[in-house]
């Protein structure tokens, strides 16, 4: 369904505090996510970043809407020059010494995917799948040498 949010979960072999730092500390975030000039896990904090493929980058405009340390981080996600507003949420659930992370990205149907195929839901699914199951996993669970 096009209007359904993307919801993905993954259990990481890392404690909640480490996962929280990874999703809320800009110095940690740049190692697996995006290189943000500034980021504060505080409601109302606005941040932006360029991302996309070479030659076709998009300015992402975001504002933190919810920040409960160790539990939940949410922010709006939109693109400069395009209609549409969405929201990304990271929720953390301790499972012993591991952490279950649930990512939800809702509001994708508000983006003009008919005019710009880059904004199709399938592309977000591919992006978040890579971010959660490769980038964040490799950051939180480095391979033993």
Image (spheres, grey):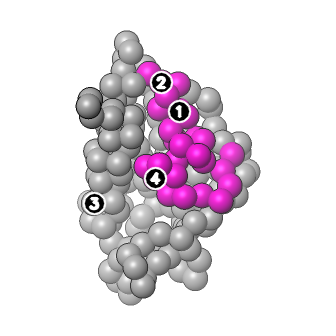
Q: Is-magenta flag for residue 19?
A: yes
Residue 69: percent from the left, percent from the top? 61, 29
Side (left or right) of 117 relative to 26: left
Label 3 CA crowd tier, 10 Å (few <14, some 14–19, many 20+): few
Q: In which quarter of the image is the N terminus?
A: bottom left
Side (left or right) of 86 relative to 123: right
Q: In which quarter of the image is the C terminus?
A: top left
Residue at the (73%, 51%) spot, across then down = 44
Give the residue at mark 2.
16
State the image quarter where residue 143 is shown: top left
User: Quick one: label 1 or label 3, which is nearer the N terminus?
Assistant: 1
Give the residue at mark 3.
126
Q: Give the alpha-carbon distance from disc 3 to disc 4, as whole Å.
A: 14 Å
Residue situated in front as seen by the camera: 102 or 12: 12
User: Quick one: label 4 or label 1, which is nearer the N terminus?
Assistant: 1
- Secondary structure of residue under mark 1: helix
- Residue furthest front as drawn: 145
Say the numbered circle drawn on residue 33. Answer: 4
State the image quarter where residue 78 is shown: bottom right
Q: Give the alpha-carbon distance from disc 2 to disc 4, as whole Å.
A: 18 Å
Give the residue at mark 1.
20
State the image quarter where residue 13 is shown: top left
């Amino acid at each position: 369904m096009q209007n359904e949010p993307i919801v993905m979960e993954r259990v990481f072999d890392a404690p909640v505090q480490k996962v929280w730092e990874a999703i809320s500390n800009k110095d940690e975030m740049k190692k697996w996510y995006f290189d943000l000039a500034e980021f504060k896990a505080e409601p109302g904090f606005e941040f932006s970043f360029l991302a996309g493929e070479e030659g076709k980058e998009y300015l992402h405009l975001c504002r933190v809407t919810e920040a409960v340390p160790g539990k939940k981080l949410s922010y709006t996600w939109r693109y400069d020059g395009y209609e549409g507003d969405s929201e990304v949420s990271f929720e953390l659930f301790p499972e012993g010494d591991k952490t279950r992370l649930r990512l939800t990205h809702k509001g994708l149907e508000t983006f003009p995917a008919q005019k710009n195929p880059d904004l199709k839901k399938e592309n977000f699914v591919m992006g978040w799948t890579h971010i959660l199951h490769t980038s964040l996993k490799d950051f939180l669970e480095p391979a033993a040498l």
